[in-house]
Amino acid sequence: MVVHGSLMFTLVQTVVVFLLLLVIAFTVPKLQPLLYVSIFFYTLHHLINKILFPFGRNFVKLFEALPDPFAKLLIGSAILYYISELITKHIEDAGFGSLAAMSHFAVKITILTLWLQQTTALIEILSTLISK
Amino acid sequence: MISFVETILGTVLSSFVIVIISSFMALMVDFLFPSFAKWTRMLLILLVITVVLQPAFEHLTLIRDIAHSISMMFISIYPILTASMIASGGAFGLLNFQPAMLLFANGAIVLTERVLIPLLTAALIFDLASRILPSVPFSKMSDLIRTTLLGAVSAVVATYSIFITAGGTMSWALSGLASEPIKELIKQNVPLIGSFMTESLGTIGRYSSGATIFAGGWLITSIWTIALVPSIKTLLTAFFYRWTAALIEPFAQEDITGILDDIGKTLFVLCAVSFLIAFAFIYTALFSIILVKLITTMK
């Protein structure tokens, strides 16, 4: 029910933000990119705190039966990837394509680093099969 | 016996459940973050290989270790056995024991240890590689290796039965009408190696019934059990993998079911290979028992 309430709130908020952006675009078109960025990040922050994190916790609790790091790892890296994609797209829309690519690359490397332990385990298992 | 089935059930069933839950998890994540789908699949494969395939890998290493230790044992015990055979003179002529067969059993184990099990490991790794990188498939290669291995193992067992029928005197009491339906049942229901299993069991049975007179039923039974436990364990595990694959097929990705199915097939071949080891073990054990018995009764 908590999620439900916050969901409604977020939807209403999105509509309000949308209207606000339209008003800004109409009244102060020169300031629009700056204000858009700040409002975007504020909304993203809100979304993450109110919806994504509770969902992530629920998700991890739901799949508690799985061996420990896998559920956390999967949902964590998927959320990280998704947020990075959003921000990348935003920066790209503002016209800084190379910066966007750079930030996305950094996040990808972070995700791979998170998986490093599991990958090491996999390689160890396969190499014990090969060597005597 | 029951507790050992329960142990297998425990480990393999828990991996059953893990596969099912994790494919649900992957479904949910795919729905939420479609752009991440490629890596969701990767993580799922990682999970399956590191957690679910653990029993299969354990069996492979188990059989490999058994093959290694038995081949070492053979190499050390063979001179003693031949020497005592020569010392006991004509007593063995009674039983139609063939020293060549002992050497042959030894050779089969060495073959298993040096060639068959490494090849089987290669097939397993080819399977995994072709599932992880679907654009570079080795599936035909691993199928080829599996069928070749099965052919080699069947040939070795056929040679065993030639040895035993050439020896003459031994015949299996159970090989009559009574066991026909059971044989047929196994032949029909165990995929890949069913007919091979009945044949090799028949061969071992023919041999050991000849030795029952000397060694006593209980001893024979215990030797059989010890020798066949790894094979039966492997067989059960293989069945569980195939059942899991069948169970999760509707909602899991094709890769995951494919991996489980392939691992099941590989384990069936591993079971066939372990029969070779079991056979050699039974043969040597009976041989030593009869030898000791002959020596003690002669004095």
Image (cartoon, coloured by chain):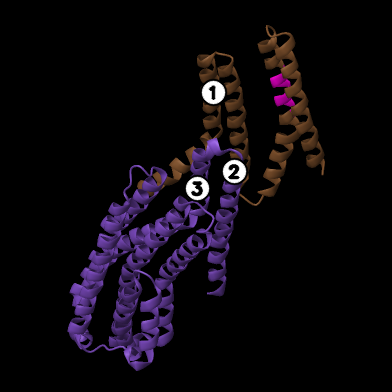
Amino acid type for the residue under numbered disc 1: His
- Tell me the distance, in whole angstroms, between the alpha carbons under discs 2 and 3: 25 Å
Please, what secondary structure does the residue beneath circle 2 have? helix
Residue B84 shows in this picture: no
Chain coloured brown in the rendered structure: A
Residue A28, how many percent across, how many down? Answer: 72, 8
Residue B143, how many percent across, how many down? Answer: 30, 57
Report which colour depicts chain B: purple
- Disc 2, disc 3: CB below 8 Å? no
Please, what secondary structure does the residue beneath circle 1 have? helix
- Disc 1, disc 2: CB below 8 Å? no
Instruction: Say if the magenta span includes residue A40.
Output: yes
Residue B224 shows in this picture: yes
Q: Is residue B261 left or right of residue B154?
A: right
Residue A119, which numbered label? none
Task: Say whether disc 2 or disc 3 marks the residue closer to the N-terminus.
Answer: 2
User: Which residues are drawn in magenta?
Assistant: A39-46
Q: Which residue is mark 1?
A: A104
- Tell me the distance, in whole angstroms, between the alpha carbons under discs 1 and 2: 22 Å
Please report, as a chain letter, where disc 2 is located.
Answer: B
Please report, as a chain letter, where disc 3 is located.
Answer: B
Amino acid type for the residue under numbered disc 2: Phe
Q: Residue at x 76, y 33 (%)?
A: A11
Q: Which residue is mark 3?
A: B50
Please, what secondary structure does the residue beneath circle 3 have? helix
